[in-house]
Image: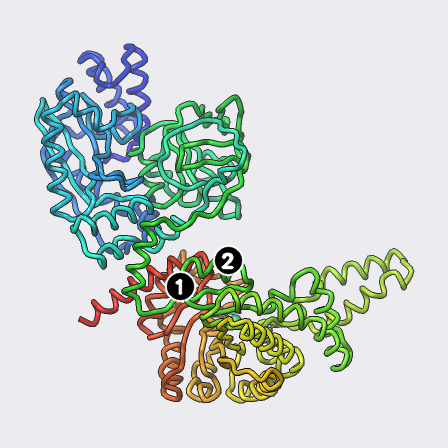
């Protein structure tokens, strides 16, 4: 309240305990305490430039209330709200209540407890308490508290009463409660109860259990799990077959595994993470001033404190791995290093923590991706029953498709065919194709690529049997497949200045000339997308031949295939009409040759504002739309998707010029408005038009909510985000339904 740093009092208290040989605060004698109070007064008047200590209780109370209100604007509160997306103008309140005392002897105490285990979800009282202690002592991590179960022996009557109250509170609020209590001379006082924060694992387990216990409905269960928690459950864990050198074992305070460079303070953790480093924050214990470092870190390690300590609770809330109370880790903050298991890890050296087992491990350890648990499957199946939006996946290879299917994808919404061009064996052919001096020469190279592409499409269509697969024709500018202009220029110039024989770098010189001729000032706005196919139709003809031949082969093998050919970066209906014209000939040829019927579609991406504005015309030619919101955001804002995020958008978001990064969460007012026009006008032309989204936003819960409102048919995202999207789509549906009511 007087802005005096708390640690000054802590140091004085520690010194007093050392002087009088007291192990805990409670062992200090009244005389020692009297002496300590004088020291405290000294600290206050020194720090407060001689202003006396406020002796009037009402004055103290008023100042304390003021301090609570002031804390709303403190750095840690601001950081917390930013992280949890809580509006800054919400305001706060202060409760004033009389004290009870837990430090009045061995029949007194204080503690915190959850009605279920917040880490695992297990249905049992979970918590810690300390006898003869006051509130802060339990969470401060200074004295190691006892598990709540020990209270059953030490204070059996109080324990039984506490159990009953806990049950009643949980039934009343129909959710896990996080309770604080104090026992004053054998009498139990409940200080507070609130909804308990829990790990992702616990959230899922508790949601399913509470449905079975008939405490909540399935819809409520689905709403009790946050999409980000599903993400957390899909976090990495340590490969069990990996050889690990365990340096220490602490408490498994927040699950998941992480590795990173050791860093010993929050500011440095933040700075290193900003510079793109993975860091693990190591502290003796954490307090709210460390939160910005925890946000930046991959995980947290502390040497003191229990599973309800600050570090544990905050890390769990953030879904970050945390090992707490690893007492055998000797943290040497001044020298920025820790010692454990006979090893010293200095700042900047990599190590690993496993928050699921509490292990602290030397070096960087191989990790694996988790599987969906039974309870999570259950929640996702309930979500599937609620959502209207389908969830498809973006994937370029059969392995992506298989993973996506396992995660519940209902189609492939974007297969970026150019990724297949980048592979080692193919790149030289692709380059020869690009450098070809005649159409005939180009066709020759394309003939070599055809079997590769057919194999790719065969694999992905087979993996997605029975489901739609949207295959996008080549999109990026051709120079992306060639060596970099700058590198070539340096190499050729060096060879020239060294006076190397001309023949030794003639190839490089030819390549340099080719790259120079393909170079563009604004390649993202240049010769790419459907423009490429219109100027070099032989490239996309080869791709479509490969798609249809693969489809024919699979159909003959009895596999049900649904290829959908997607033409990117269309801005005018004429572009689409012409492109389709070329391709229809190829399709007809392949199918006539095979004498087989196949269900296929032609559609387009809507990724230019003009395309959205003339969507009614475009739908004449397109059987489906897919919003390429990466490009649509780029072209709507005029922000380069390659450069703007770091240089402009992050500072814009910091300065609140933009509410969020539009490449992460759809910009509803601009990009969303264009999408709305495209959906409405596209369907006016073609009422059964299927509309999806395949930009990065397709896996972002806030963007999925916008897609629900716009009436899209599906969202498409990376395979790992499919479960998140399934849940987010259900949340979006429920929110939309409630808004309609
Ligand atoms: C898009 O622009 O949103 C899209 C999906 O295409 P790409 O990211 O490949 O340009
Ligand atoms: Mg695009």
Colour style of the rendered protein structure: rainbow
- Which secondary structure, mark 2? helix
Nearest the camera: 308 or 94?
A: 308
Q: Measured from the top left, where is residue 605 in percent x and y?
A: 49, 77
Indicate the quadrant where residue 86 lies. Answer: bottom left
Say if 227 sits above or below 696 in the image. Answer: above
Sequence order check: which comes first, mark 1 or mark 2? Answer: 2
Q: Residue at x 33, y 75 (%)?
A: 711
Q: Position of residue 560 (x, y in %)?
A: 48, 73
Pointer 1 local density, CA inside 10 Å: few below 14, some 14–19, many at least 20:
some
Residue contact between numbered discs 1 and 2, judged by CB atoms under 8 Å: no
Q: Is residue 20 visible?
A: yes
- Vertical side of 535 occupied by 521: above or below: above
Query: Which residue is under mark 1?
Result: 665
- Quarter that holds the N terminus: top left
Q: Provide the residue designation for mark 2.
A: 646
Task: Between label 1 and label 2, give the one nearer the viewer.
Answer: 1
Q: Nearer the viewer, residue 347 or 316?
A: 316
């Amino acid at each position: 309240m007087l802005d005096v740093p708390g640690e000054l009092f802590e140091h004085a208290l520690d010194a007093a305990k050392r002087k009088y040989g007291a192990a805990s605060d409670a062992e200090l004698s009244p005389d020692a305490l009297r002496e300590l109070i004088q020291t405290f007064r000294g600290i206050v008047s020194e720090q407060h430039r001689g202003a006396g200590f406020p002796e009037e209780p009402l004055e103290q109370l008023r100042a304390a209330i003021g301090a609570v209100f002031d804390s709303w604007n403190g750095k840690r509160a601001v950081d917390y709200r930013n992280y949890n997306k809580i509006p800054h103008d919400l305001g706060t309140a202060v409760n004033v209540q009389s004290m009870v005392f837990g430090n009045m002897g061995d029949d007194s105490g204080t503690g915190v407890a959850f009605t279920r285990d917040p880490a695992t979800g297990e249905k049992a009282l979970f918590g810690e308490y300390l006898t003869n202690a006051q509130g802060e002592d339990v969470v401060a991590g200074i004295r190691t508290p006892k598990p709540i179960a020990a209270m059953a022996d030490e204070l059996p009557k109080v324990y039984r009463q506490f159990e009953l109250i806990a049950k009643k509170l949980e039934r009343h609020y129909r959710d896990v409660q996080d309770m604080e209590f104090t026992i004053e001379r054998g009498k139990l006082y409940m200080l507070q109860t609130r909804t308990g924060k829990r790990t992702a694992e616990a959230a899922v387990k508790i949601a399913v259990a509470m449905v079975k216990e008939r405490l909540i409905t399935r819809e409520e269960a689905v709403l009790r799990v946050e999409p980000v928690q599903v993400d957390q459950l899909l976090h990495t864990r340590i490969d069990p077959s990996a050889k690990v050198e365990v340096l220490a074992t602490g408490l498994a305070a927040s699950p998941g595994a992480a590795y990173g460079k050791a860093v010993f303070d929050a500011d440095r953790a933040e700075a290193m993470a900003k510079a793109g480093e993975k860091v693990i924050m190591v502290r003796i214990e954490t307090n709210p001033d460390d939160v910005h470092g925890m946000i930046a870190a991959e995980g947290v390690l502390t040497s003191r404190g229990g599973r309800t300590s600050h570090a544990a609770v905050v890390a769990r809330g953030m879904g970050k791995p945390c090992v707490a109370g690893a007492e055998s880790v000797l943290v040497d903050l001044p020298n920025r290093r820790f010692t454990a298991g006979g090893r010293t890890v200095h700042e900047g050296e990599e190590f690993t923590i496993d928050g699921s087992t509490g292990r602290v491990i030397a070096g960087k350890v191989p990790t694996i991706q988790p599987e969906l648990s039974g309870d999570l499957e259950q929640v996702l199946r309930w979500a599937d029953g609620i959502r209207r939006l389908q969830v498809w996946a973006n994937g370029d290879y059969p392995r992506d498709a298989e993973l996506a299917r396992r995660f519940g994808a209902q189609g492939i919404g974007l297969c970026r065919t150019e990724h297949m061009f980048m592979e080692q064996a193919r790149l030289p052919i692709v380059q020869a194709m690009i450098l070809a001096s005649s159409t005939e020469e180009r066709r020759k190279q394309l003939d070599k690529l055809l079997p590769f592409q057919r194999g790719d499409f065969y694999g992905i269509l087979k993996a997605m049997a029975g489901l739609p697969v949207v295959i996008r024709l080549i999109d990026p500018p051709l120079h992306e497949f060639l060596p970099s202009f700058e590198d070539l220029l340096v190499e050729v110039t060096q060879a020239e200045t060294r006076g190397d024989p001309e023949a030794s770098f003639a190839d490089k010189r030819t390549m340099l000339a080719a790259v120079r001729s393909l170079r563009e000032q604004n390649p993202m706005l240049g010769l790419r997308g459907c423009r490429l196919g219109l100027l070099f139709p032989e490239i996309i003809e080869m791709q479509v031949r490969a798609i249809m031949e693969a489809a024919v082969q699979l159909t003959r093998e009895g596999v049900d295939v649904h290829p959908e050919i997607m033409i990117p970066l269309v801005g005018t209906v004429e572009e689409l009409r012409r492109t389709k014209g070329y391709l229809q000939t190829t399709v007809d040829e392949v199918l006539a040759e095979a004498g087989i019927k196949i269900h296929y579609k032609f559609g387009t991406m809507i990724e230019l504002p003009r395309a959205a504005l003339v969507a009614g015309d475009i739908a004449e030619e397109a059987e489906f739309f897919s919003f390429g919101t990466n490009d649509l955001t780029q072209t709507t804002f005029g922000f380069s998707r390659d450069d703007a995020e770091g240089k402009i958008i992050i500072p814009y978001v910091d300065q609140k010029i933009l509410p969020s990064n539009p490449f992460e969460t759809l910009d509803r007012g601009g990009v969303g408005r264009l999408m709305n026009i495209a959906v409405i006008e596209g369907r006016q032309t073609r009422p059964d038009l299927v509309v999806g989204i395949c930009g990065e936003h397709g896996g972002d819960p806030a963007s999925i909510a916008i897609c629900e409102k716009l009436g899209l048919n599906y969202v498409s995202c990376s395979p790992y985000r499919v479960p998140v999207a399934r849940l987010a789509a259900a949340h979006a549906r429920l929110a939309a339904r409630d808004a309609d009511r």
